[in-house]
Amino acid sequence: MAQYQSKLMQTLVERGFLYQCTDEAALDKAGVDGPVTGYIGFDCTAPSLHVGSLVQIMMLRHLQRAGGRPIVLMGGGTTKIGDPSGKDKSRAMLTTEKIAENKNGIMSVFDRFLNFDGPNGAIMVDNADWLEGLGYIEFLRDVGPLFTINRMVTMDTVKRRLENEQPMTFLEFNYPLLQSYDFVELNRRYGCTLQLGGSDQWGNITTGVDLTRRMEGNEVYGFTTPLITTASGGKMGKTADGAVWLNSDPALGADYFKSPYDYWQFWRNTDDADVGRFMRLFTDLPLDEIAKLESLEGADINTAKIVLANEATTMLHGEAAAKDAEATARKTFEQGGAAAGLPTFEVSDVAMNILDAAILVGLASSKGEGRRHIKGNALKVNDERVSDPDMMLGQDDIKDGVIKISVGKKRHALIKPS
């Protein structure tokens, strides 16, 4: 491994974040010479970010802990186009109102990971502030000549669409220009010299680096992370039950939130082979402590998994939530019963179909999925298997003031009459 002098590069490389960098030596020197200001953009395509975005958020966290200033860029402007990166088909167009709603849900997470006060306090901005004010003709005259069609058709996203004979709209074709221009504006406004992102953003990041150098004459850098997959080859943050969301607000709907308990369980269920790597990426634990924990074997590796779950959940939801989740898991799985601390949903009337109940508490995304749970003997009420999809819950199902709904051995929720 190359010897890095800056705390920023040492941390990012040692903890496994580096995949590509436009100039490692120059970025390392910039980190030694003074605080680095860096940014990551988040388009507002959903009301919550999921664990897949946590890799990027943790990079901003490490940037700040190394003395740099992180910028969280909300894509209120670029979301109106839709990032084609990694997509074989065009994204659905969102209304301005829906984009604003999604933006509010996303923004609520960042103060758990970043400090927005102090001399290197994080900054949150929205690219709609400058993109929506651009005169299109003027923008094309200033930026258009610095892009060539020859280069753009070699970008992975464009090339993939053409090879698969999938259409790419002219609207989407403009996306790299606008994302690149974000870097120019952030460099002008805040002295930002670093753009961070996932490996699928490499083409957009390098065009942004090039555009900023050509328009501003400033040295700037790009840094990407590898695609994080699990030991089984699955995409990080994607489970059989859907995405692992960072928001815990049930008001977002069953498809867009995870309770602190379910979030803790996600990390607790990490594959043995992933424990050390995930600790380096998703916690602040010292590397020597991680080395000891990941060396545990057999049943002892469960100790490391609990540490991972507690550390990750504490960072997002607080120490109390992590302790409650661990205690709930121990009581639920070792002693049985409906432990306090499980996700609880209050209803005015418990009389409802079991499929509707499963959707309400987030254990099924649709009635079809609920029926599949029943067919697989996975759906339970008060630890009793449900065999009839027409089953109705009622007052007789209330035990100790609640009705416990479960899918499998590890996913549980409570319905409580209000």
Image: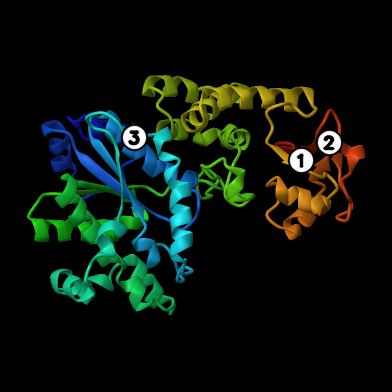
Question: Which residue matches tag 3?
Answer: 61
Pointer 3 or 1: first along the chain: 3
Q: CA distance from mark 3 to mark 1?
A: 36 Å
Q: CA distance from mark 3 to mark 2?
A: 41 Å
In the displayed structure, 288 sits above or below 244; it is above
Q: Secondary structure at mark 1?
A: strand
Can residue 399 be seen here?
yes
Question: Which residue matches tag 2?
Answer: 383
Q: Pointers 3 and 1 in contact (CB under 8 A)?
A: no
Residue in the foreground of this view, choosing between 258 and 24: 258
Please state which amino acid type lies under the numbered disc 1. Ser
Residue in the foreground of this view, choosing between 168 and 23: 168
Pointer 2 or 1: first along the chain: 2
Please state which amino acid type lies under the numbered disc 3. Arg
Q: Residue 251: percent from the left, percent from the top?
A: 60, 47
Q: CA distance from mark 2 to mark 1?
A: 7 Å
Q: Secondary structure at mark 3?
A: helix
Q: Pointers 2 and 1 in contact (CB under 8 A)?
A: yes
Left or right, 267 with reference to 328: left
Question: Which residue matches tag 1?
Answer: 406
Q: Secondary structure at mark 2?
A: loop
Q: Residue 215: percent from the left, percent from the top?
A: 10, 60
User: Image quadrant of residue 137?
Assistant: bottom left
Residue drawn at x 34%, y 61% is 77
